[in-house]
Image (cartoon, coloured by chain):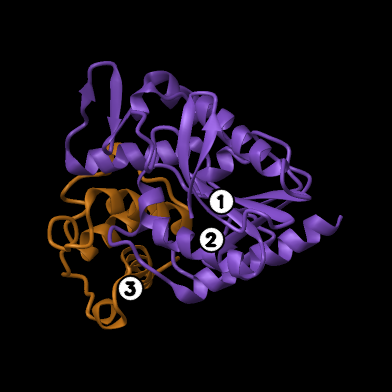
Amino acid sequence: MNATYLEPGGSEHMLSVGEDAATQIILLSPLFEEANRMRKTLVDILHGLGALGFGVVLPDMPGMGESVKPIVDSMFQDWQAAVRAVVDGRRARAQAVLIASFRGGALLDAAAPTDGVWRLAEETGARLLRDLSRSILARGQRNRAGNDFDLAGYALPPLFVDDLEKALPQPLTKSRSVRLHQDTNEADARIQGAPLWRRAEPGEDDVLTQAIVNDIADWARVCAQS
Amino acid sequence: MITSSAIEQQLGIILADVLGLSPARAQSLSRATGLFGAMPELDSMSVAGLLTEIEDRFHIIVDDEDVNGDMLETIGSLTHYIAAKLAR
């Protein structure tokens, strides 16, 4: 279950099921606070896909989750390198490797070539930063500690902020974009559910989780066959 | 032209979605319901999410300088803000 992967900066934590499965799916979680809010749902998705016979990993990026590295020492490129390392690690043991990315995770899913990408409510770096800076506005404390921007508890180096500001989900030939039904942005499919990544109280939505698992599984089967 | 009560109704749906309010709680929302500082589910992070959802669903831009205690005081004050934005 608990596993590690080696990335250029050292060893990082990931959750892993079904190591020997022919099709491996890498879950890229949302970034920053949204990752905490969706953690339970992502772990449920990992187990749901595992039960369908897929190999699934949920890696922590350097400086996030269980990582011992301070985020202030991380660069956006380090996250891209970490994703490449996870993809390479899966590639060694599988016939097909896919990425399922959530929200800001979609900013990292083109870091390495895969057999297919699935995205939920992909978001631009600029809009994620806006969310973070607004939450500071709402608290009435726009603070700058030293050279690092303290964005809602995440002390991000300025260069990281610059790169994130410019980051966009990349157009990919083999990708499927899924959004919630109330989201009017372009998508290949829409599913019923609430934006759990917005909620202060980490929520659960079993129906939404199952819909996500089924949609990823269908897409993974399509990609693995072609 | 969208009416004030239609905005208020849509705002209730967004709040329920974003904050995960129970159907009973969502039903009890009114113009006078207090928001930031009054509603325990609405922390500073979810205020940011709420504003982004409002932008997406009403197709307006909320200026950072407009984000303050007055605007976020009640459902009524937020409805008023959205109505003014839509009227422009």
Q: In the rendered image, which quarter is residue A148 located in? A: top left
Q: Which residue is mark 2?
A: A46
For disc 3, the marked residue is B5
User: Residue A129 at what x, y percent from top left?
Assistant: 40, 36
Q: Which chain is purple?
A: A
User: Decide: marks 2, 3 in contact (CB < 8 A)?
Assistant: no
Q: Is residue A118 left or right of residue A102?
A: right
Residue A189 falls in image quadrant: bottom right
Amino acid on which disc 2 is placed: Leu
Q: CA distance from mark 2 to mark 3?
A: 42 Å
Chain drawn orange in the picture: B
Residue occupying the far left of the picture: B38
Q: Secondary structure at mark 1?
A: strand
| Closer-to-camera residue (A40/A212) | A40
Q: Nearer the viewer, residue A17 or A155?
A: A17
Q: Is residue A194 above or below residue A21?
A: below
In the depicted structure, whether residue A91 falls above or below residue B8:
above
Subunit under mark 3: B
Q: Secondary structure at mark 3?
A: helix
The verdict on a common chain for dots 1 and 3 is no
Q: Check disc 2: other Cα within 10 Å, few if <14, some if 14-19, many if 20+.
A: many
Question: Mark 1 or mark 3, which is nearer to you?
Answer: 1
Label pair 1/2, CB-CB below 8 angstroms: yes
Badge 1 is on which residue? A57
Q: Rounded to the nearest whole Å, what is the CA distance between mark 1 and mark 3?
A: 47 Å
Secondary structure under badge 2?
helix
Identify the residue shown where x is 32% and y is 48%: B48
Is residue B63 something one can see in this rendering? Answer: no
